[in-house]
Amino acid sequence: MSATPAPAFDPHRFKAMERAGFNRIAARYADGAHLRADLAAALLDASRLAPGQRVLDLASGPGLLAADAARRVTPGGHVLATDIAEAMLAEGARRCAGAAEAPSFAAADAERLCLPDACMDRVLAGLALFIFPHPERALAEIRRVLAPGGLVALSVWGPRETVPLISRAQDCIARLLPPPKVARPSVFRFGEAAELEARLTTAGLEPVDIRACNFDCRFDDAEAYWQAFLDLAGGVAEALERLPTATRQRLRAAVADELAAYRCADGGTGYVVPAHTLVAVARRPA
């Protein structure tokens, strides 16, 4: 008797789970932005924004990057923040209400943008490329909507072993829960600069610069770390929320074992957990 084949990866189901998860965590995701402030600043600086530019922010979430970009392209510029999670966009619009310079918000799938060709001078994608089920489609859309000579600036997590901010929580989940029936795309799949450069080149974009951005996150206790992970995790957070309460409580209690190596070395309490990322800039050929 033959074994039942494993379920195939379903990109539509994956997107639905990501949408539900990010809708669930919209406000908390925005509240935790200070942990990633150095990365956001590095991405905006790398994008070479200037007044008058047209900017698209993909997978914008609550529009924090887009809001900062809007201030940089004033006067005369415009920023469009897009995401598949409508609650994220609503949170962004709420936080930008009354601002003198603010982005526009629109629900959109990065793999199928309803935008004309060559309509943007810059595209931003902060911690987003690895989320897309078909990143090659998203990169093709980025190239299509960029004006000739326009730039895309994006950030991704580095190799798994360099991002305990994410991997320690993943290890805790793997230790306590059975493996998923269908594997998710790894959030670390573009963590090597050579792989990221190859993807950009294959998409018809000319890599301009890829450099590391390292930052540390300080947490008062393991509970704060676990909550910060959930506030970043999108579809994973949604899947965990559907587990029995007792199972979720076991995960929260067990994550401290994974963090032992990151206890504050300065005599203080809590943990300092590092993260390594890459910030890449590429150009659509003129």
Image (cartoon, rainbow, N blue to C red):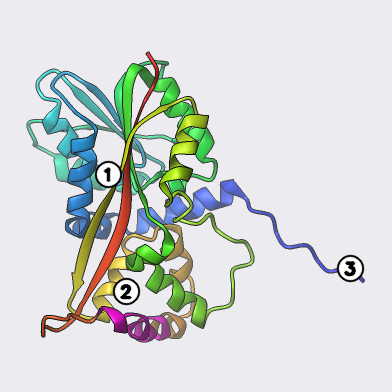
Main SS of the magenta part reads: helix
Q: Nearer the viewer, mark 3 or mark 1?
A: 3
Spatial CA distance of label 3 from label 1 is 49 Å
Residue corresponding to mark 1: 90
Residue corresponding to mark 2: 226
Q: Earlier in the sequence, mark 3 or mark 2?
A: 3
Q: Which residues are magenta?
A: 250-262
Q: Is residue 137 above or below residue 166?
A: above
Q: Residue at x 44, y 86 (%)?
A: 246
Q: Residue at x 48, y 52 (%)?
A: 189
Asked if one can make out residue 111 in the rendered structure from this viewpoint, the answer is no
The dot on residue 197 is none
Spatial CA distance of label 3 from label 2 is 41 Å
Give the amino acid type for the residue marked by disc 3 in the picture: Ser
> Where the C terminus falls, by quadrant?
top left
Side of 120 relative to 76 (left or right): right
Give the amino acid type for the residue marked by disc 1 in the picture: Ala
Q: Position of residue 66 (x, y in %)?
A: 22, 37
